[in-house]
Image (cartoon, rainbow, N blue to C red):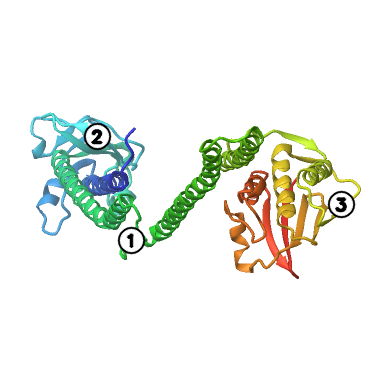
């Protein structure tokens, strides 16, 4: 699946948004102008109908239409469109000269209540028309005369119309102009957005080019963040730089680890080779051969311990160990490991003190990882404790976690070297290479503590080196 482009997304998204806004505004403008034009036509039609209604005058029983004279009078209001009169009493129909042989539809509303309709003229053109039912105009003097005709006896209907083809043509032209303007504006905005986004994304391309260049180098330098990189991306670039630095540091540690591992295995292999060469370079009696074979077997056993530790450390770091969460007694495992280590590492020149509670709540964790952690901490303390020294083991139990502490004389260890103790193949000054001790114990313990969700820390105080392992329940 092809990865989406930020520039394409922003261009299309912004363009669509602008298009919707332009479309909505053009529709609003078009409807507003259309409504204004038709309102103007309706206003003119109502004005014309009102004037025409007043031009019908009842005088002395005779109905006269004065609209012709009114249209010729100077200063008279314009009468727009064509119109037609119906005298409902006599049935007489009167039309404007502009209507010619055509006719307007007959319609009206209540008395003096004009209504407007869309109609079609005789020539097929669309039009707007207003129909008005009214009574003819009568002077006040005529109204007071006896036996004078009453206006309500002479109902009149006037229909006044005006074609709308010209308005429709004008609106069509306006719509075309608005459409062209919208398309031109949209294209201009799209082009501007594309150029702006291209300009804004240039620092990202530069950062990507620097990253590509860095990936091709064996020992890449610190990657420089472009000065014109958008501020929103500076944090991301900085974190990415920091991540790359951590990766480089991890690679450096792995290289160092590989070199140390090769060295740790090269030394015993050289010892085995030398022992066997000495056994074969001249005839020897059986007791001498057995001794040399035993020496080679002892070195091989140490190599096996080192290889097992390397394999276990690799599996812990890669989180390949299958975790099995159960409830177990942590005090029982710790005491069992202390007894076992005391038998395997015979030290009569040290004193061991244990400060454990009588009971501890079961720990809901991986018992195997817990055993790896405590066994390596206990064996480390026994290996590094100088002659005549004291080792103290302490357990503190709480509802949230269990804390296991080992302490022994630090034997001149510098405070600045504490953090390096957790790195593979780091040994204290009193440590030896005997019994396969390769400086991997604390690395194993720290990885096990991490997988248990806890932490392992080292501190020195009053000549004592203490390792504190905190394991959550």
- Vertical relation: 341 (above or below) 423: above
On-image quarter of the C terminus = top right
Q: CA distance from mark 1 to mark 3?
A: 58 Å
| Label 3 crowd bin: few (<14), some (14–19), many (20+), radius 10 Å | some
Residue 332 - label: none
**Mark 3 highlights which residue?**
356
* Residue nearest the viewer, comparing 406 with 317: 406
Q: Are marks 2 and 3 in contact (CB under 8 Å)?
A: no
Question: Would residue 302 appear left or right of 203 to someone viewing this image?
Answer: right
Query: Which residue is depicted at the point 73% across and 56% down?
Result: 468
Query: Which residue is depicted at the point 69% across and 63% down?
Result: 459
Q: Which circle's residue, 1 or 3, is located before the other in the chain?
A: 1
- Mark 3 lies on a secondary structure that is loop
On-image quarter of the N terminus = top left
Q: Position of residue 282 (x, y in %)?
A: 53, 37
Question: Would residue 169 appear left or right of 351 to someone viewing this image?
Answer: left
Q: CA distance from mark 2 to mark 3?
A: 102 Å
Q: Is residue 51 visible?
A: no
Q: Which circle's residue, 1 or 2, is located before the other in the chain?
A: 2
- Mark 2 lies on a secondary structure that is strand
Q: Position of residue 311 (x, y in %)?
A: 57, 38
- Mark 1 lies on a secondary structure that is loop
Q: Are marks 1 and 3 in contact (CB under 8 Å)?
A: no
Q: Which circle's residue, 2 or 3, is located before the other in the chain?
A: 2
**Mark 1 highlights which residue?**
229
Q: CA distance from mark 1 to mark 2?
A: 63 Å
Question: Would residue 443 appear left or right of 83 to someone viewing this image?
Answer: right
Q: Position of residue 289 (x, y in %)?
A: 62, 35
Q: Nearer the viewer, mark 1 or mark 3?
A: 3
| Label 1 crowd bin: few (<14), some (14–19), many (20+), radius 10 Å | some
**Mark 2 highlights which residue?**
118
Query: Which residue is depicted at the point 57% across and 42% down?
Result: 310
């Amino acid at each position: 699946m092809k990865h989406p482009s930020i520039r394409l997304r922003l261009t299309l998204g912004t363009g669509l948004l602008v298009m919707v806004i332009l479309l909505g505004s053009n529709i609003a403008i078009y409807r507003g102008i259309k409504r204004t034009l038709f309102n103007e036509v309706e206003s003119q039609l109502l004005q014309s109908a009102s004037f025409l209604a007043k031009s019908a005058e009842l005088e002395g029983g005779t109905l006269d239409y004065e609209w012709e004279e009114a249209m010729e009078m100077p200063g008279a209001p314009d009468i727009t469109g064509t119109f037609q009169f119906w005298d409902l009493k006599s049935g007489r129909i009167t039309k404007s000269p502009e209507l010619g042989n055509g006719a307007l539809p007959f319609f009206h509303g209540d008395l003096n209540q004009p209504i407007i309709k869309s109609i079609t003229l005789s020539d097929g053109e669309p039009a707007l028309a207003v129909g008005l039912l009214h009574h003819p105009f009568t002077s006040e003097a005529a109204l007071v005369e006896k036996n004078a005709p009453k206006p309500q006896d002479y109902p009149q209907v006037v229909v006044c119309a005006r074609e709308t083809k010209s308005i429709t043509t004008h609106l069509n032209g306006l719509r075309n102009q608005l459409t062209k303007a919208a398309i031109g504006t949209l294209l201009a905005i799209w082009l501007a957005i594309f150029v702006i986004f291209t300009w804004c994304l240039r620092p990202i391309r530069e950062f990507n080019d620097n990253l590509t260049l860095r990936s091709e180098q064996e020992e890449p330098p610190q990657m420089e963040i472009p000065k014109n990189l958008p501020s929103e991306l500076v944090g991301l670039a900085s974190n990415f730089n920091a991540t790359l630095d951590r990766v480089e540091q991890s690679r450096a540690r792995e290289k160092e680890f590989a070199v140390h591992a090769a060295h740790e295995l090269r030394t015993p292999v050289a010892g085995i080779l030398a022992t066997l060469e000495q056994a074969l370079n001249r005839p020897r009696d059986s007791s001498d051969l057995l001794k040399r074979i035993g020496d080679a077997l002892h070195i091989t056993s140490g190599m096996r311990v080192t290889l097992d530790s390397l394999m276990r450390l690799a599996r812990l770091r890669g989180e390949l160990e299958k975790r099995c969460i159960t409830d177990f007694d942590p005090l029982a495992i710790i005491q069992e490991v202390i007894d076992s280590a005391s038998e395997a590492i015979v030290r009569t020149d040290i004193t061991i003190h244990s400060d454990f509670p009588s009971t501890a709540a079961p720990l809901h964790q991986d018992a195997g990882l817990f055993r790896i952690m405590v066994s390596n901490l206990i064996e480390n303390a026994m290996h590094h404790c100088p002659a005549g020294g004291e080792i103290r083991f302490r357990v503190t139990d709480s509802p949230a976690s269990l804390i296991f502490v080992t302490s022994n004389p630090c034997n001149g260890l510098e405070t600045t070297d504490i953090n390096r103790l957790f790195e593979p193949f780091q040994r204290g000054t009193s440590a030896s290479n005997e019994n396969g001790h390769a400086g991997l114990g604390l690395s194993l313990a720290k990885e096990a503590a991490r997988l248990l969700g806890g932490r392992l820390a080292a501190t020195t105080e009053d000549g004592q080196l203490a390792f504190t392992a905190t394991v959550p329940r």
